[in-house]
Amino acid sequence: MKIYDYKGFPNPTRVRIALAEKNALQAVEFIHIDVLAGEHREPAFIAKNPSATVPVLELADGTFISESSAITEFIDQHFDGISLFGTSAQERAVIHMLQKQAESGVLDAIGAYFHHATEGLMESYQNKDWGLKQKQNAINKMHYFNQLLSTRKYLAGNNYSVADITLFAGLAFADFVKIEIPPECKHLLDWRASIESRPAVASI
Ligand SMILES: N[C@@H](CCC(=O)N[C@@H](CS)C(=O)NCC(=O)O)C(=O)O
């Protein structure tokens, strides 16, 4: 199996952490896509993912899978080890809910800020007000997650899950664009330090 990505970018990081948690990084061939040079917008890559984003997973039969949530779900099912998506119906639904909130409320909101209110990536269209609004939305969500983490160890409860991975990648994106986690969000900051110290996360 192959993964087309750009090491260190937020969404590729989600996939690499999931693989590391499963001890499966060696099972994958990584193919570097030079996003900074626009390689992801060339026809050869668009044929793999019409959305022109990394990461993309290619399976042995030639199937291409984009969207980090889908790729990490495949990884969770395909490889043995810790369950990242939960087991019971309730646990799976709660993890899904929190991953979605972390993705749209933090990671994608910060992405909108990056693409619209900073230089971004060779953007053909920008709406600065939209970008700034999304930055504020991301900060509001940090407060929301801080509150949640005042009563639980991990985002979805007692067990580490893909929701933690997605929020962690979102906060790394915040660092990159210099959006500070509000210092009063102590539970969020402590949680982040605990995720950072996981061997799989530290190995990425
Ligand atoms: N929803 C997609 C988003 C992927 C995404 O936006 N990837 C970024 C890198 S972190 C990218 O390829 N950006 C290129 C661009 O926006 O032109 C996912 O979950 O994988």
Image (spheres, helix red, strand yellow):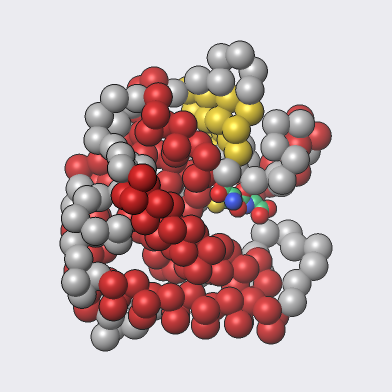
Residue drawn at x 56%, y 14% as measured from the top left: 60
- Expressed as whole percent of the image width and height from the top left, the position of residue 37 reads 68, 46
Residue drawn at x 40%, y 60% as measured from the top left: 98
**102 over 139 or under it: above or below:** above
Residue drawn at x 52%, y 79% as measured from the top left: 137
Position of residue 144 in the picture relative to residue 107 (left or right): left
Question: How many numbered marks are there?
Answer: 0
> Which quadrant would residue 87 be assigned to in this image?
top left
Residue drawn at x 53%, y 24% as measured from the top left: 2
What residue occupies the far top of the structure in this picture?
Answer: 61
> Which quadrant would residue 119 be assigned to in this image?
bottom right
Position of residue 187 in the picture relative to residue 107 (left or right): left
Q: Nearer the viewer, residue 118 or 3?
A: 3
Q: Nearer the viewer, residue 203 or 81?
A: 81
- Expressed as whole percent of the image width and height from the top left, the position of residue 113 reads 60, 72
Position of residue 188 in the picture relative to residue 170 (left or right): left
- Expressed as whole percent of the image width and height from the top left, the position of residue 64 reads 63, 28
**178 over 77 or under it: above or below:** below
- Expressed as whole percent of the image width and height from the top left, the position of residue 165 reads 36, 51
Q: Does residue 168 appear anywhere in the picture?
A: yes
Query: Quadrant location of the C terminus?
Result: top left
